[in-house]
Amino acid sequence: MDLVQNDKHGEIDCKACEILHQVHDILSAQWQMQNEEEMKKLLDTSGESEALNLIPAIQYKSSARAILVRRIIIGNIMFLHFVSGSKSFRLDIKIPHTDKKKRDINLLREYLKARIQRNVFNYFDDSLHPATEMAPELDRLAQPVMQIISFFLHLRDFVRLTLTNKHFNKMSELPEIWKEYLYRDFPATVASEKALHPKAQYLRIFLRKKMDLILLWIDVKLLLTVNDTYNLETLRRVVMESILDECDELPTRISVSHICQNLSVKGDTIIYAHNTEIIFADTIGEITKKSSDPIGTIQQVRMCSLPSICIVVVTTDVGIQALDKSGAKPMLQYPSPNQVQTKVDDCGFYRGISALELMEHIFLVVGTSTGDILFFKSKSTLKSAPLPKMELLRKIKCHDQAVCSAESTLSGSFLATSDENGTVILYDPNNDFDILHRINGAGYSVTTMKFLNDDWLVCGHLNGLVHFHKTSDAKLYARLAAHARALTAMDSFGMRFITVGEDTFMNVWELNISAEMPEVELLESKEIQDEILVGVAFDSDTRMVYTASYDNTYLRSWKIEFDD
């Protein structure tokens, strides 16, 4: 056992000497060495860690200042200390074990060169990266931060910075930055294919090595050892598959209104709102429109898919209307025609739609601008009347602010409503809609909600955040920064959900509950440039995802693919 341990220490010491030689060559190429005699002792050392630690500091002279460099080896970590009259920096280098696949000597040099250039030369030589010219606001930062604005960040932090800050947005596609990241993280697998953008190269290599569909908002870890080298032909055979195919456009000739959750899909039927009209479209391009009755500006339109029936519900600033899937047969008009002249509710509009199927009856839930919740119930069972008429069951004052959205589980186990203050209320439909939990808001509207099975409630907020609440206790278990601007719509399927927002992004997420705490993974992110997304819908029958954008006269569709 002792012999094996000694051999291991000897291999590490030998590797440490090799790294020291490489570091000296890299530093000498840019800085002038001052005490060559001490360096000669270092290069002539026997290679033992104890001897290396006793060598005095080596002095170099950069263009700006003198720098002392001292190395200390503890275990399999080499600590390099760079100290000048006004600055200091420590570089930690892990000494690889030689029992792993041997690392190419050129690869080791390129890796060290990239780290020293990024962390040491840029810091001590006062060299500014060209990306700093893209944002004048960087002048307010400290000088060292300005010098290494992109390279001191993990890649996920750099991407988040460029996506959420308008001053840094142009940096997100800058080839110089991505080339630096590419050579820093994957120096052995960089393709010499000039036509391929460095960002595209990085994504291909990273996804290939990690063997997962992980995008840039997930933690990107530095690969300290490279287990494989790929030649150009191997790299060309790497085809990264997306869970979303390229999109198709479905012309509608009628623009989409700017209201949240402005899209619903079931099979080949698609609906959305345009001012006072309900637009019915299908996948082959047939378009019909129907005015709301009574006529008013539409606040929300939704196709509610229940186990036995699918109904279309429209809320406006003057009333509520429920129709069959085709929009031809009415089921509810509230207020009734003889009540239109004398307004029955003291509210400015109706918004927030959900429907449940309980005990062979249809229950319709609609919110109001005054915070009241209206409960409607079918007059007869679905067995006795396939398309039953509906009537008002009762009205309850639940919210202090205008209601934004309503959602229920497919099983009918839970109902949720939200308002403009961010308050969310959970109900028990099987117990006369008693209130189970009240989640206090923080001042931001909950624009959309979805249940993931019967266990989780996902709430999308006006500030772009997504909150995850467990239905059993309504506690906040996780918070996700899903969008840089307002989150406008969401849809779910199983434990996956899709969000869209005014930041032009559509994101596909998956909630993993196998761990002790819930984990959220970003499966796909699509930027739809120059479009304000206001609707998204997933159709389980066709496995298609549809999006709607404000003031556009077409919809977009993607075929979604999953391993399961």
Image (spheres, grey):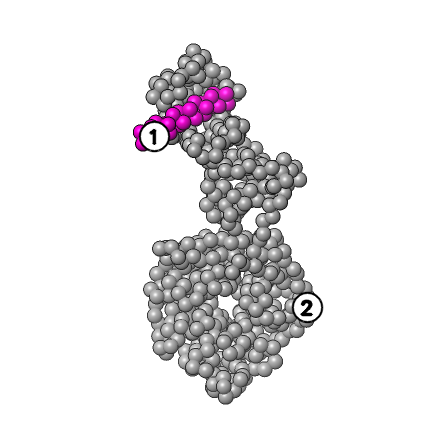
Task: Select label 2 or label 1 by which is in front.
Answer: 1
Magenta span: predominant SS is helix
Residue under pointer 2: 285
Residue at the far bottom in the pictured view: 384
301 or 2, which lies in front? 2
Q: Is residue 146 visible?
A: no
Residue 5 badge: 1
When asked about the image quadrant of residue 466, the answer is bottom left
Please indicate whether residue 275 sits to the left or right of residue 368 in the image: right
Callout 2: helix, strand or loop? loop
Where is residue 444 shown, x and y percent of the image?
43, 59
520 or 137, which lies in front? 520
Where is residue 320 shown, x and y percent of the image?
52, 77
Q: Is residue 539 visible?
A: yes
Report, in whole angstroms, how far the alpha carbon at label 2 lies from the one at label 1. Answer: 73 Å
Please indicate whether residue 434 sits to the left or right of residue 228 in the image: left
Callout 1: helix, strand or loop? helix
Q: Residue at x 47, y 43 (%)?
A: 220
Say if the magenta span includes residue 105.
Answer: no
- 228 to 80, vertically: above or below: below
Q: Which residues are magenta?
A: 1-26
- 207 to 489, vertically: above or below: above
Where is residue 212 shown, x and y percent of the image?
50, 49
Q: Residue at x 41, y 67 (%)?
A: 454
Where is residue 235 shown, x and y percent of the image?
60, 41
Residue 549 badge: none
Type of the residue with mark 1: Gln
Circle 2 crowding by C-alpha within 10 Å: few under 14, some 14–19, many from 20: few
When asked about the image quadrant of residue 284, the answer is bottom right
- 330 to 557, vertically: above or below: below
Looking at the image, tell me whether mark 2 or mark 1 is earlier in sequence order.
1
